[in-house]
Image (spheres, rainbow, N blue to C red):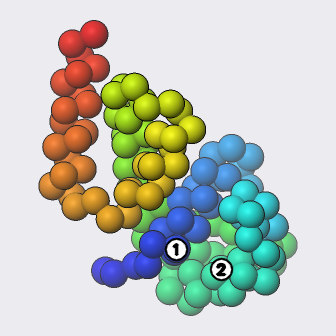
Amino acid sequence: MEIHQSAEDYLETILILKERSGQVRSIDIATEMNYTKPSISVAMKKLRENGYIQVDKDGFITLTKSGYEIASNIYTRHKVLTDFFISLGVNAKTADEDACKIEHDLSEETFEKIREHAEKASHRH
């Protein structure tokens, strides 16, 4: 299924916030992503309509199974790429920013080769 990069970013942010604080509201996402509350509200409405999130009566957001799968996949890519760039000698901030830029566009084949290479390198140490 085709999903836009921005939707992947929102889902990934929801997952990160959920892991960090246990509960997520739109305002938390707006703060974390540095977006306005209205733009987050529009995005959450689309994610809910597409079945990626659920919002309870108190405004708490949870990922559905499909939303979690997408978020988890992107978050894993982000962590693997960030760690790989750091292992190459890139500073942590730049590594994190660059991982963000390419985590959505990298082919599955290239990502898997980076992951395999990173795993082999970590076993050598």
On screen, residue 49 versus residue 2, left or right, reads right
Q: Position of residue 83 (x, y in %)?
A: 41, 33
Q: Which mark is residue 76?
A: none
Q: Position of residue 11 (x, y in %)?
A: 54, 66
Q: Amino acid at mark 2?
A: Met
Residue that carries the numbered disc 2 in the rendered image:
44
The number of discs equals 2
Q: Position of residue 28 (x, y in %)?
A: 78, 61
Residue that carries the numbered disc 1 in the rendered image:
6
Give the camera-side residue of 17 and 65: 17
31 is higher (above) or lower (below) than 51: above
9 is higher (above) or lower (below) than 98: below
Mark 1 vs mark 2: in front: 1
Q: Label 1: how many residues lie within 10 Å, few (<14), some (14-19) or many (20+)?
A: few
On screen, residue 99 versus residue 84, left or right, reads right
Question: Residue lying furthest top in this view?
Answer: 125
On screen, residue 87 versus residue 9, left or right, reads left
Which image quadrant: the C terminus? Answer: top left
Q: Amino acid at mark 1?
A: Ser
1 is higher (above) or lower (below) than 97: below
Q: Is residue 24 at least partly visible in the picture?
A: no
Mark earlier in primary sequence (1, 2): 1
Residue at (68%, 87%) from the top-left corner? 42
